[in-house]
Image (cartoon, rainbow, N blue to C red):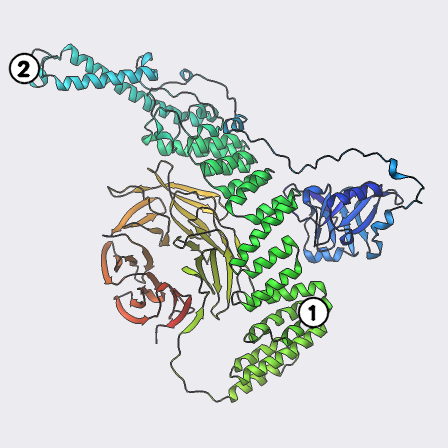
Amino acid sequence: MQLTLKYNEHATQALSAAFIRGNDPGVWLQEINAWQVPLDKLVCFVVAENNNPVNAAGLFVIFGREKMPALLQVMHPYTVLGGKLYLPVNAELSPAISESELQSLLIWDYQVFHPTIGFIGFERSDRINLADLLEYTEPRNVYWGYAQAGLQPWIPLNQIGVQRLTAEEVFESFKEHIGNKPLTDIPKSNKSEVPGWLNNPFASGLFKGVFTVLSGLNSLLPQGLLGSSGSGENGRDEGKSPGLFRKFINWMEEKIEDLEKQRDSELKRLSDMFDKNIEEALQYAIPLNSPYLSRGTGRQSGSLTKRSTQFNLGRLGGGHAVDGWNVDNYYSELRAKYLKAAQKAIEEKDFKKAAYIYAQLLGDYNSAAATLRQGRYYREAAVLYKEHLKNLSMAASCYEEGGLLTDAIELYTELGQHEKAGDLYRDMGQEEPALNCYEKCVVAAAANKDYLEESRLVIDKIGNKPRAKKVLLSGWNDVKQPEACLVKYFELAADDNKEEIHSVVKAFYANNKVVNKEMAFLNVIDKVNQKYKTTELENTCQGIAYEIVSEQVSAGNPASLHVLRNFVTGDQLLTPDCYRFLHTIKDAPKQKPAPRQFKLMNDVHWKKTITWNNQLLVWGVKPSGMVLARMNWDGYIEYFSWYEKLSLDTPIVALADPGHANRILLYGFDEPLTEKCLPKNKHFQDELIVSCPDFLGSKAVGICMHQGEIVVLNRGIDLSKIFLIRYSLKGEELEDVPCTYTGEGYGPPRDLVREMIWCDGNYYLICRNLLLRISELGTIDVLYQADAPIHKMVVNQQHDGSLTVGLGVNNKVLFVIQDQGETHTITIDIEVVEVEVLFDSRFVVAGKKNVLVYDGSVFSKIWEHEVENEIIAVFPGTNRDQLGVLESNGKITLHDIRE
C-alpha cells in the first residue's frame, strides 16, 4: 500500500509545526522572529533537497504546546498525526489508515510528509540549535557616534477588513438573465376574454371602484327610479327588461367576473408552465408565503407579470404594494412545484436560483439561508440569518466559514461566545484581545463552579498550567466534579514528569487531602494507575487501597472490600476471601427499606427530567446559565454547564428517542445553545450528545423525536397554514405534509412550542385548552376541549387497544379514554404538578407535595406518598415498580410502590 497526500480545503487540523522554505538561515530566523515565540521551545530540523542531499530545502520547526503563533502568521503550517507524523494542515492521508497501522509505519522519532519532497524521517539527534546558525565576526574599531538615524519602521498591519455592502449591492450579483418571452406566446385556455384595457392594473382598479360606487347608489335610490317603468319587484314587471342603468351595472359585473375567471386561468397556466419550462415559469411565479404580503395591496389585473429570478434580499422586506392573488385552489399544487424547482436547482448547483425560490416565492428563509450556505455564499447567508431570521449564531458561523472573521467576532461577542471570539482573534494574530476573551470565559466558568471547563480554558487557551492545577484542586474540594477534577490534576502532573507520578499521588494522600472522600480517591487512583502503569505507581496505589479499605471495613462499610480487586489483580483467591469474610458478618434484622436518596446542587432552580436507558438527566437554571446533572442509579453524578444567560422561568423542552438515537435535543431558546458531549465512561455505558437544533426556525408549535427523526408541527409564514415536517437529525428536510382540520371553528395553533408524543401512528399535542391528534398524513382532530388551559400530558395505550391520555388542568387531572371509537373522561381533583405513566398502565399524578399512583384499568388509587418540599418532577425508576421524585431543593428519592 502506497500512502499519498490528498488536498482537503475543508480540513481544520490544529497547528503543530511549520516549514520554512529556502536554504538561507537568515530567512529562517527572520520568519521565526515574526512569530514572537520563545526559541528554546522550538524543535528544528534541516530538510535536505531530495535530489541533492547537500543543499537544504528548508527548515522544519515543531512548536511547543505552551505558546504557538497564530495560524495566519505561518506560511506553511503543519499538523501532527499519531504524535509523530507531520503533514500540511490542509492535507490528509490517502487511503485513510487506522491509528494502529499508522503507528507501525512511524519508525523514526519524527516524520514529515512534504507534498513535493516526500517522506522524511528524523532522529532526536538530528535536532539543530538555532544559535549554531549565527556567524559571529570580529568587532571592528569603528566610532558609532557618526551613525545616522534610519527609516522609521512601517506601522504594523493588524487587520484587513472587507467593505460591508448594502443588501441590494450584495444580491445584485445574483441576477440571472433568463430570455424574455411574452405571455401572449403561451396558449390561452379561457373562452371569455376581457377588454385589453382592463388588464391594466390601474384601469381594472378604477373600473372596480366605479362599479362599487354605482352598485351602492343603485341600492340607495328608490326602486324603479333608474330602472324600467314597470312596478314589479326590483323596479320591473314580470317579462320587462331592466333599464339602461341596470344594464350598465350588469355589464360591469360580467366583466369583473370575466377578470376573475381570467386570473384563475392564469394560475392554471402558471401551474402547467412548470411542467414544460421551469426557467420561464419562475419569471411569472407569484409568492405563496411572505410575512410582508399584507403591507399593501396593488391594483388587480388578470395577467401574471414577469419578475427577475434574482435573489434580492432587499426585496424580502416588502415596502411596496403587491397584486394579491387568491391562490387557495392552487396553493398546494404550486407549492409542490416550487419545491421541486428548488430541489432541481440545487441538484444543478444553481444555489442562487434555489435561494430565490425558497425566500421570495415560498417565504422559507431557513431553507434559503441553508441553500446559500451550501453554495458557499457565506456573506449572503449570514445577512439572511442575521437580518431576517434573527439567528445570530448561524450568521456568525457563516461569517466565520466565509473568512469574514471581524464580522463573526462581533456576533460571537454579542452572543456571549467569548471563547469562539478569542479563537478568531488568535487566528488573526491578535493575542491580547484573544486573552481578554478567554479570561471572560474563565470568569463565567468559575462563577458556575465548572472547574473542568475553567481548567481547560486556562491550559488550552491561556497556557498557564500551575494556575490550572489550583483550579482543579478547588474542584476536588467541592461536590460538583471532584473525581474528574482530581484525575485531570494527576494527568497534568504526569505531563510534567510521568516517572514521578507515584510521588505526587503519595504526597497528596499523605497531606490529608482525601478526608471524607476516601472511596472517591480510590476511584481516582484506579483510573490513574490504569493509564500510566508504572511499577512504582502500582505499588503506591495498592498500599493506599489496603489502608483505606481497612479503615472503611472497620467503620462498617464491608462493601468496600470489592474495590481491592482493582489494585490486586494477580491474587485469584482475593475475591473468594472477600465473599467469605462478608458472609461471616452477622446479618442485621431486616427492616423496611428506606427510599434511596440522592442530592443535587442546591443553588440551581431544577426544572426538567428525562430518563435515557441507564441515565437520569436533570436540567436546571441559575443566574450564570443552564446546568445539566447526569446521574446513574448508583448515585454517581456529573454536571455540565451552559453559560448563555436564561431567566429562571425559561421553559425547557428536552426530547429523547432512546431506541434510535444517542442524542438529546433542546428547543425553545432565543439562540441555539452550545452542543455538549456526555462521554461514555465506567459510570455510564452510553455516550450522549445534547444539542440545540438551529434549523427549525421560530414557527414550531409541536416537536418530537421519533424513529431517529425530528418531527415538527410548523406554522406557515402567513400563519394561516400549518405543516407536519420530518427532518433528519442533521437538519435535512425529509417530508413536508400540509395539515388540515377535520372540525370547524379551529385555526392553526399559535401556542408556545410543546413536546408532541407519538403513539400508535398518531402525534398528540396540547395547545392551550385543546388536545390535538395529528395523523402522519396531516389530518388534525380536536380530541378533547377542556374548560381551562392544559399544561401537562401523558399518553398510554392499554393492552386491550384502548387509549388513555392524562391531562393536567389547573386543580384537576383528566383522563381522556378512547375505546372502540367512543370517548369518555375521568376527573380527579388535585392541584397537578406532573403526570407520568409507569409500566402496566399505572398513572402517576404529582401534586405540590404529594404523589399518587392509580391503576389505569379501573383508576383506583394504589399508592400515595408525601414529601417535605415542593415536587418538580416524577419519573420511572430502574424497574417496573420504582418511581423517582425530584423536589425543589434538588433532593431525589426512589420509591418502591409495592411497599
Query: Could you tell me residue 158's position as x and y percent?
Result: 66, 38
Question: Residue beneath label 1, please?
Answer: 501
Rendered image quadrant of residue 454: bottom right
Count neighbours of disc 1 (C-alpha within 10 A) and say few if under 14, some if 14 to 19, many if 20 or more: many
Q: Is residue 156 left or right of residue 50?
A: left
Check the image and report above or below for 445 versus 751: below
Please report the residue visible at 40 percent of the width from the left and 70 percent of the height from the top: 893
Q: Which quarter shows the C terminus?
A: bottom left
The label nearer to you, 1 versus 2, is 1
The answer to which of 321 and 357 lies nearer the viewer is: 321
Residue reaching furthest to the left = 231
Q: Amino acid at mark 1?
A: Ile
Count neighbours of disc 2 (C-alpha within 10 A) and say few if under 14, some if 14 to 19, many if 20 or more: some
Helix, strand or loop at mark 2:
loop
Check the image and report above or below for 722 versus 880: above
Question: Residue beneath label 2, please?
Answer: 231
Q: Is residue 464 left or right of residue 717?
A: right
Please report the residue visible at 37 percent of the width from the left and 54 percent of the height from the top: 757
